[in-house]
């Protein structure tokens, strides 16, 4: 039921507001938990990487079946159930961290939160696709991303101050955030599954390597690109800055707050650029900018330069991040949107989890040689920029998409 005019569907605005709350309350947790595991629980870089790897790998089957369920039974039920389950999960997570319970308990909470958040993310992407037409879709996903980053920036600053008292206190934030999300979904997000959708037909579709090869190709390129370009959002950078330069949580979260500010200021300008030069070319240029920024991390640790570098890195993020959803929405048949987002997320979950593992492994091996450490990541981003140009032939243009 997408709108035919240029205005956003009211439910898209509601989802964007929910993502603001989610960004505020949940994004800082992975930074805090990385530092907590290093400085409080005294785990090695590699041990931390393994925990983050397990966190993501366990989401694979839930990504697939969550997407299929939303195609058959509808989006609204799952969209409402996820924040309810997350509320209790984060409450338990707070208790585990506050009481310094076993590492197994910490890992279990990370896995549970990751599974539920992943299903919630895929259902949200399906709803956004249902409620927007092709010409609106990029801006719809970008609106959600901009408000999410506004929440992230606010949350990072707030979490930096709470970390001075006790980092565990911020783990209560997503408990309250999930409660607000329940209200937003219940009141403002209707069932978005298209009325023309035939559940029996959707149920008969079986994933095929041959028939769904475009989905596989696009997902693999996006996943391997994110494997290296998203090192900024893995434990690598917080651990690197903490161990090498002894930066406190407040400075590290401030660095990420700059990231969110640039997203808010420039995301829609980048969208305008992508309409001129093409979405795939914009994506490739973004990976090149990522590459340059990562190289700078290996050259200097001066905080002022790192702030500017974080801004440059975010321009690369602005040119790549939203296309992970937009590209899948372009190729997904109407009656398999949830399934396509689910399978794409599953492919991501097979590959992207190695990002924190690879990052922490590189940190363990090359910690005395930062130029080599970040140079490897920089070279990988350049390589994926070239590979991503393969998508020009398979991603439909907005006016030609399904």
Image (cartoon, rainbow, N blue to C red):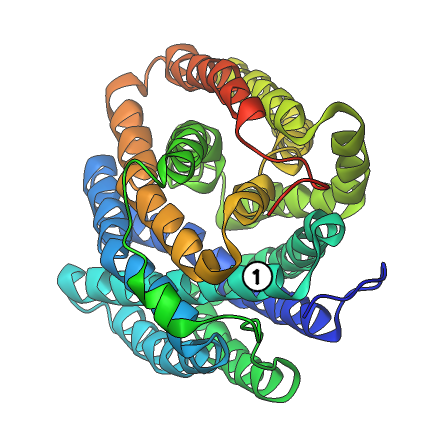
Q: Is residue 158 visible?
A: no
- Image side of residue 60 versus residue 185, left or right: left
Tell me if residue 237 can be seen. yes
Position in image of residue 84 (x %, y %)? 41, 83
Residue 215 is situated, as x and y percent measured from the top left of the image, at 41, 40
Looking at the image, residue 209 sits to the left or right of residue 124; the answer is left
Residue at 46% x, 17% y: name it. 387
Residue for point 35% across, 72% down: 200
Residue for point 52% across, 81% down: 176
Q: In this view, does 187 lie above or below 208?
A: below
36 left or right of 178 in image = left
Label 1 secondary element: helix
Q: Label 1 neighbourhood size at 10 Å, few (<14), some (14-19), many (20+)?
A: many
Q: In which quarter of the image is residue 93?
A: bottom left
Give whichever of 342, 180 is nearer the camera: 342
Q: Where is residue 229 in the image (x, y as percent from the top left)?
A: 48, 29
Q: Mark 1 points at which residue?
A: 23
Eyeballing the image, is 245 above or below 106? above
**As drawn, is 61 to the left or to the right of 352?**
left
The number of discs equals 1
């Amino acid at each position: 039921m997408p709108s035919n005019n240029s205005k956003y569907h009211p439910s898209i605005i509601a989802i964007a507001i929910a993502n603001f709350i989610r960004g505020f309350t949940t994004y800082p947790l992975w930074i805090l938990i990385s530092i907590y595991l290093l400085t409080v629980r005294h785990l090695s870089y590699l041990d931390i990487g393994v925990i983050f790897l397990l966190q993501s790998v366990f989401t694979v089957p839930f990504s697939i079946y969550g997407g299929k369920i939303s195609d058959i039974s509808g989006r609204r039920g799952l969209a409402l159930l996820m924040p309810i389950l997350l509320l209790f999960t984060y409450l338990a997570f707070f208790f585990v961290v506050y009481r310094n319970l076993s590492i197994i308990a910490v890992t279990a909470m990370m896995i549970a939160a990751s599974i539920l958040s992943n299903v919630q993310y895929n259902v949200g992407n399906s709803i956004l696709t249902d409620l927007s037409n092709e010409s609106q879709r990029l801006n719809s996903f970008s609106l959600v991303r901009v408000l999410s980053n506004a929440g992230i920036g606010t949350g990072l600053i707030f979490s930096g101050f709470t970390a001075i008292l006790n980092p565990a206190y911020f783990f209560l934030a997503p408990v309250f955030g999930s409660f607000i999300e329940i209200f937003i979904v219940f009141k403002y997000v209707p069932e978005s599954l298209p009325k023309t959708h035939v559940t029996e037909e959707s149920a008969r579709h079986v994933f095929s390597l041959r028939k769904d090869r475009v989905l596989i190709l696009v997902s693999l390129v996006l996943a391997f690109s994110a494997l290296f370009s998203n090192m900024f959002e893995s434990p690598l950078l917080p651990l690197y800055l903490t161990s090498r330069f002894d930066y406190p949580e407040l400075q590290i979260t401030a660095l990420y707050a700059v990231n969110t500010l640039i997203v808010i200021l420039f995301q829609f300008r980048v969208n305008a650029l992508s309409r001129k030069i093409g979405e795939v070319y914009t994506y490739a240029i973004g990976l090149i900018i990522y590459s340059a920024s990562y190289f700078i991390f290996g050259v200097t640790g001066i905080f002022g330069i790192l702030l500017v570098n974080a801004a440059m890195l975010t321009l690369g993020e602005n040119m790549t991040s939203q296309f992970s959803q937009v590209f899948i929405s372009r190729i997904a048949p109407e009656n398999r949107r949830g399934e396509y987002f689910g399978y794409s997320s599953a492919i991501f979950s097979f590959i992207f989890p190695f990002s924190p593992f690879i990052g922490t492994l590189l940190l363990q091996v090359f910690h005395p040689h930062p130029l080599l450490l970040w140079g490897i990541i920089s070279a990988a981003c350049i390589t994926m920029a070239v590979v991503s140009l393969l998508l020009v032939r398979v991603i439909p243009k907005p006016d030609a998409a399904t």
